[in-house]
Image: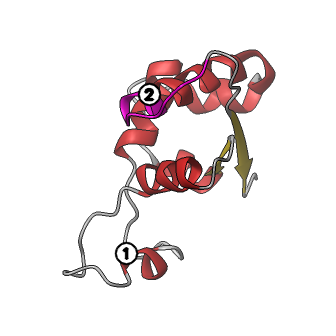
Amino acid sequence: MSVEFMNFLNSFYLSEDDPNYAAYADGEEETGQEIYYYRREAEKLKNQEMGTMIVDFHHLASFQFNDPKFMDNLLQEYNRFEPYLRRGLTQFLADMDFQIHPNRFYQIGIYNLP
C-alpha cells in the first residue's frame, strides 16, 4: 500500500481536461506538457512548512495502480490502511530531499469523495 501510494504521488500528472491544469500550466513553455501535480504540491508543502498533503479523490480514482484492489481497500478500510499511506507520503517526501525529522508527522487529506 505504501509503495502504491508513493508511486501515485510521484507519477500522477494532470491531464489537460483537469480543472487545475490551466492554473499550473500558466507560464509553462509548452502547452500539453505533463504537470506532475503532487511533486509540485510537495514543494508547496515544504516551502510553507505544512504537514498535510491534500489529495483529490478523482486523481486517485483515475490513476492506474499496479494493485487492482488498491482503491477498494482504500474505500472499504481507510482507517486500517491510512498508516501505510502516511508512510508512502513520508518516503515520497524523503525521495524529494525533504529533511524528514523523526518527530514530524505528515498527514493526508482527501477531498472530492464520492
- Nearest the viewer among 12 and 68 is 12
Task: Give the residue at x 73% y 44%.
Answer: 109
Reply above or below: 65 against 27. above
- Nearest the viewer among 67 and 95 is 95
Separation of marks 2 and 1 at Cα, in angstroms: 29 Å
- Nearest the viewer among 25 and 49 is 49
For label 1, count other residues whose C-alpha is less than 10 Å away and answer few (under 14), some (14-19) or many (20+): some
| Region of the chain picked out in magenta, as a range | 92-101
Would you identify the image quadrant in which residue 78 lies?
Answer: top right
Q: Amino acid at mark 2?
A: Ala
Reply above or below: 20 against 68. below
Q: Is residue 39 left or right of residue 73?
A: left
Residue that badge 1 annotates: 16
Most common SS among magenta residues:
loop
Residue that badge 2 annotates: 94
Secondary structure at badge 1 equals loop
| Residue 31, x across and y down, in percent | 24, 81
Task: Give the residue at x 65% y 23%.
Answer: 73
Secondary structure at badge 2 equals helix
Q: Which mark is residue 103?
A: none
Is residue 53 on the magenta stretch?
no
Q: Name, please, the residue furthest toward the left.
A: 30
| Residue 2, x across and y down, in percent | 52, 20
Q: Amino acid at mark 1?
A: Glu
Q: Is residue 13 left or right of residue 52?
A: left
